[in-house]
Image (tube, rainbow, N blue to C red):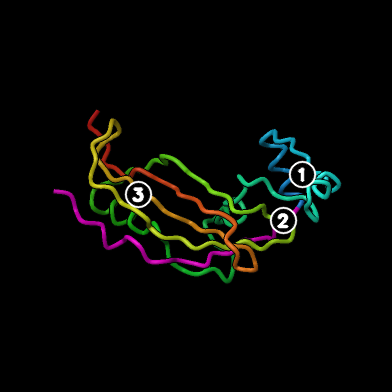
Amino acid sequence: MAEDFSVYLGGEFGPFLAWDEVNAPMIRHWCEAMGDTNPIYTDPAAARAAGYNDIVAPPTMLMAWTMNGYAGKRPPGSAEGNALAVLSAMSEAGYPAVVAVNCEQEYERYLQVGDRVTYRATCESISEEKATALGTGFFVTELSTFYNQRNEVVGRQRFRVLQYRPAAQ
């Protein structure tokens, strides 16, 4: 019988801060890397013509502003804690492997140059133990809600992983 990891459900972690405010150079780099040529992301005149004060960030950058640094550190002032602490518990319980399954994002509004992004996260769901081609394990979903400096919701992200015991080869 599988262990009960439901104690990790719920609770809110955060706020987790962004390293930098939303800025034009990072938007330009993102657009170039992704091949996104929408002018409201890189041309202030096009952004103003579309009703914005300045360029806006592509919605798909939502998480980019608040990602941990290369060394795994969060920006100073960020809260402690981890909405996905259950993954360590699962690893210790004999489910050592993890694979990202999918990511769903919802956007409420564009991020604008100068916005300061924060997010709060929760462990939204943990499936019953499932047998998959990779092995037996659990699907775990983290829900992150993103805010600007006025505490307005700008978007949400559901990030799902499979934490599993690899199948015998």
Q: Is residue 56 above or below residue 130?
A: below
Q: Nearer the viewer, residue 1 or 105?
A: 105
Label 1: which residue? 40
- The range drawn in magenta is 1-23
Residue at (35, 63) in percent of width and height: 10
> In the drawing, what numbered circle is on residue 140?
3
Residue at (50, 51) in percent of width and height: 157
Q: Quadrant of the C terminus?
A: top left
Q: Which mark sits nearer the N-terminus, 1 or 2?
A: 1
| Cα gap from disc 1 to disc 2, whole angstroms | 11 Å
Q: What kind of element bears circle 2? A: loop
Q: Is residue 60 above or below residue 150?
A: above
* In magenta stretch: residue 136: no
Image coords of residue 23 (percent x, y): 74, 55
Amino acid of disc 3: Val
Amino acid of disc 2: Gln
